[in-house]
């Protein structure tokens, strides 16, 4: 007899970097979990996956669905639509950032998001807690309470720590709770009112610049403190070539540091800003071609472990202004997997490495979430076909671009999510 | 629920349609032309080309000889409404545009957005649509943010022209055109000239447009002179200009010296120590002026800060073209409006 969470995925190319598996095979799901090899299908519904890739579901370290804002105004339907978008992109695990409010409110929003996601059967929610109280950077956040509520790490997002002493203590305190600190290296004073990479393009357009040093100065300071107190840290959204070198050196020196990059920064540069199109207004900013190339190399060499969408779901009004007045960020979940597979097609990265950067690596950073198709693992997976389609997502920096790969179906715990 | 969702989608689509009747993917240098290559807006000097710049200057010359000097008006834009949309205070520029519009017999409407912050998103779009519905044919836009003129041009329909009267630190094309007019009147050709632009290039839309115009007209050498804190990063790469930190070296043998205004707030944000120190290094004194060619022109977009950018002796001296610049502003702006809204060189109007 077959249960409702049984399915036989037939004849796809099963690619599971965690288990070193890459073969054409049938994949059987029984009771929402990957069945061991040799187990009989016994009437499970069949999904034909010939000529398709069968991958673990994506774990997205940074996709801001605006859940806290939506919860505040009762936008449950909007949240559902955004979870649908995630599932349609093959994403089965999302990392939810802390909201700027009090701990209790932030945890309540997290609970409601988790409940909403579970009800919708869309994706699993992982969460980060606030490293400082209300993200104000002055005193420590209630990290133990947040850990007990299920947070897998802490972060201050892009909000600055008031001084190096607060940062140092946050690192120490988090280390004592065995929490990873997710750091965004950006010096607030050097970033100032900058809106674009400081370089020739911003100079011509008259856009205030964010120098490379805004990232590297913060990174250098943070690395020095991590070395000092022996904390575990993850660096979010690298944007410059120099940052990759600094992280690599720290890793060679034995520091417990990892890093990720937003997928747009692997493809776009500041040249895209010439039309003042707010879809390209991002933070950290799109930088020079040499930076983009170095980020690709850093990914290939394993210095950068994960690639995330760094998706932001804005209301249309947020982008309805002259470029410097628009909110930074743009939708990107839909482009995450297609772009990474194109990177593999182009030979910039092994296919297995490209998939690992989207699945098992970020899952490990989230405290050993799924991210694998090993027997016994929850059947969070996606089926991807080579089929051309055009980006028509409003506000996407890739609008009008053709993608070669497309997510056909997504399963979460053996249930079809998209 | 499905119906509600459809309604929501419909509303979103409506908003997007409002937002961009034209493609937002075009840089201002291309956005300002229509499919036939005619100028629909003046957003930036980039992409204009030498020929069109010369046409505008020639046409300004005709206006200069005629109505700009006397009380006569030309009936060229009778029945056309021009809206001065200023999101940033500027009496001088606004007055210059108003005079130009009145001398062309246009009706002028003033729209002062005292607090630009109130005018964003939907409310800005609503205002633009309202003014457009009232028959405005041309918007003169001044805004504190770079890219604002192109944003507004993108929000309006095809029949409305936009003149950028200064957007953030990006561009101020009519100021650059009137400066080119002044140089041409006094120096004729650009090819043999060495022009030194002095001061706060980093924050200056005027400098960006001047550099683009000088380059388009084939100026032999463009120099940028100023402290590094007030120069954009990658200046040489971005503008193809030679950079000098030393004023004397930068002025050596120059034919034209274009000074930029120094804003008070630069001292507070640690760009330079104070005005006295600025004058000490970059103030244009008779001794420094002597390093340039004997017949070198001294220009400044105004208003000047005596004892900061320039000494009174030089400002009021025989080489100063500062007042001439102001006088040419009206005729150059007349030429631009006439080009955009009609006249021999203009485009035919869709609703004509």
Image: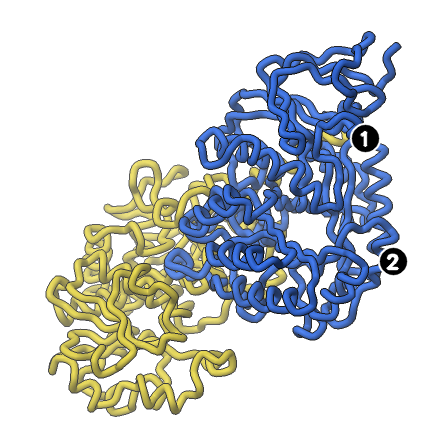
Check disc 1 and report the residue beneath it.
A121
**Residue A47 numbered tag:** none
Residue B304 % position (x, y)? 35, 82
Apparent side of residue A291 relative to residue B133 in the rendered image (left or right): left
Residue mark closest to the camera, 2 vs 1: 2
Residue occupying the point 76% across, 65% down: A132
- Are the two marked residues, 2 and 1, in contact with CB atoms closer than 8 angstroms? no
Q: Is residue B243 above or below residue B352?
A: below
Foreground pick, B167 / B231: B231
How dense is the environment of label 2, judged by Cα within 10 Å: few (below 14), some, or many (20 and up)?
some
What whole-number distance in Å separates the C-alpha atoms at marks 2 and 1? 27 Å
The numbered mark 2 sits on a residue in which chain?
A: A
**How far across and down, in percent of the image, does residue B242 sit?**
24, 68
Q: Position of residue A29 (x, y in %)?
A: 78, 20
Using residue A328 as the reference point, say whether residue B75 is left or right of it.
Answer: left
Q: Which chain is yellow?
A: B
Helix, strand or loop at disc 2? helix
**Residue B84 visible in this rendered orientation of the protein:** no
Outermost residue, top direction? A43
In front: A59, or B42? A59
Q: Residue at x 62, y 43 (%)?
A: A308
Q: Residue at x 58, y 49 (%)?
A: A319
The color chain A is rendered in: blue
Left or right of B167, for residue A177 = right
Query: Of marks 2 and 1, which one's residue comes earlier in the chain?
Result: 1
């Amino acid at each position: 007899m077959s249960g409702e969470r049984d399915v036989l995925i037939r004849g796809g190319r099963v690619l599971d970097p965690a288990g070193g598996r890459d073969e054409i095979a049938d994949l059987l799901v029984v009771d929402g979990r990957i069945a061991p090899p040799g187990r009989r299908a016994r009437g499970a519904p069949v999904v034909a996956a010939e000529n398709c890739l069968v991958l673990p579901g994506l774990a997205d370290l940074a996709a801001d669905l605006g859940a806290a804002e939506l919860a505040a105004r009762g936008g449950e339907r909007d949240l559902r639509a955004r979870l649908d978008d995630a599932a349609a992109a093959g994403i089965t695990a999302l990392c939810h950032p802390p909201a700027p409010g009090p701990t209790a409110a932030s945890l309540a929003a997290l609970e409601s998001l988790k409940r909403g996601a579970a009800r919708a059967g869309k994706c699993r929610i992982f969460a980060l807690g606030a490293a400082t109280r209300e993200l104000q950077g002055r005193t420590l956040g209630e990290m133990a309470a947040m850990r007990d509520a299920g947070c897998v790490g802490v972060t201050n997002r892009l909000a600055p720590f008031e001084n190096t002493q607060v940062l140092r203590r946050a690192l120490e305190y988090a280390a004592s709770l065995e929490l990873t600190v997710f750091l965004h290296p950006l010096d607030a004073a050097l970033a100032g009112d900058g809106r674009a990479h400081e370089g020739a393009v911003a100079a011509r357009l008259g856009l205030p610049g964010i120098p490379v040093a805004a990232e590297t100065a913060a990174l250098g300071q943070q690395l020095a403190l991590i070395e000092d107190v022996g904390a575990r840290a993850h660096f979010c959204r690298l944007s410059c070539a120099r940052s990759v070198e600094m992280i690599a050196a720290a890793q060679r020196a034995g520091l417990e540091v990892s890093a990720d990059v937003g997928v747009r920064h692997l493809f776009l540069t500041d040249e895209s800003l010439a039309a003042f199109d707010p879809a390209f207004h991002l933070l950290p900013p799109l930088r020079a071609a040499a930076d983009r190339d170095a980020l690709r190399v850093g990914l290939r060499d394993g210095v950068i472990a994960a690639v995330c969408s760094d998706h932001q779901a804005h209301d249309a009004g947020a982008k309805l202004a002259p470029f410097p007045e628009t909110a930074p960020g743009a939708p990107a979940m839909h482009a995450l997997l297609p772009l990474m597979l194109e990177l593999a097609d182009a030979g910039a990265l092994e296919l297995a490495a490209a998939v690992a950067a989207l699945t098992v690596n970020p899952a490990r950073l989230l405290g050993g979430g799924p991210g694998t198709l090993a027997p016994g693992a929850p059947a969070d997976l996606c089926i991807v076909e080579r089929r051309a389609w055009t980006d028509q997502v409003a506000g996407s920096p890739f609008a009008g671009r053709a993608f070669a790969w497309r997510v056909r179906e997504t399963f979460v715990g053996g249930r079809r999510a998209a | 629920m499905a119906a509600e969702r459809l309604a929501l989608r419909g509303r979103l689509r409506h908003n997007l349609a409002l937002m961009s009747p034209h493609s937002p993917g075009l840089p201002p240098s291309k956005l300002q032309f229509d499919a036939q290559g005619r100028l629909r807006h003046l957003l930036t000097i980039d992409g204009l080309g030498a020929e069109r710049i010369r046409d505008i200057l020639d046409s300004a010359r005709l206006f200069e000889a005629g109505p700009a000097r006397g009380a006569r008006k030309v009936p060229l834009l009778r029945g056309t409404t021009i809206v001065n949309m200023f999101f940033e205070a500027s009496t001088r520029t606004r007055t210059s545009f108003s005079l130009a519009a009145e001398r062309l017999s246009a009706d002028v409407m003033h729209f002062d957005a005292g607090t630009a912050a109130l005018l964003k998103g939907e409310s800005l779009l609503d205002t633009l649509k309202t003014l457009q519905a009232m028959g405005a044919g041309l918007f003169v836009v001044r805004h504190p943010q770079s890219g604002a003129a192109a944003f507004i041009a993108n929000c309006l329909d095809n029949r409305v022209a936009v003149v950028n009267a200064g957007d953030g630190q990006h561009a101020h094309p009519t100021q650059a055109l009137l400066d080119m007019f002044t140089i041409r009147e006094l120096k004729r050709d650009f090819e043999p000239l060495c022009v030194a632009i002095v001061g706060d290039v980093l924050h200056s839309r005027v400098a960006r447009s001047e550099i683009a115009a000088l380059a388009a007209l084939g100026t032999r050498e463009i120099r940028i002179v100023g402290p590094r804190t007030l120069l954009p990063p990658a200046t040489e790469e971005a503008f193809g200009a030679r950079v000098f930190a030393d004023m004397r070296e930068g002025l050596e043998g120059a034919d034209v010296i274009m000074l930029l205004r120094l804003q008070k707030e630069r001292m507070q944000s640690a760009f330079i120590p104070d005005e006295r120190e600025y004058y000490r290094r970059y103030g244009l004194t008779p001794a420094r002026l002597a390093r340039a060619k004997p017949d070198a022109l001294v220009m400044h977009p105004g208003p000047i800060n005596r004892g900061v950018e320039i000494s009174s002796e030089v400002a009021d001296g025989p080489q100063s073209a500062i007042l001439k610049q102001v006088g040419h502003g009206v005729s150059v702006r007349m030429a631009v409006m006439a080009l955009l809204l009609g006249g021999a060189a203009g485009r035919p109007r869709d609703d004509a």
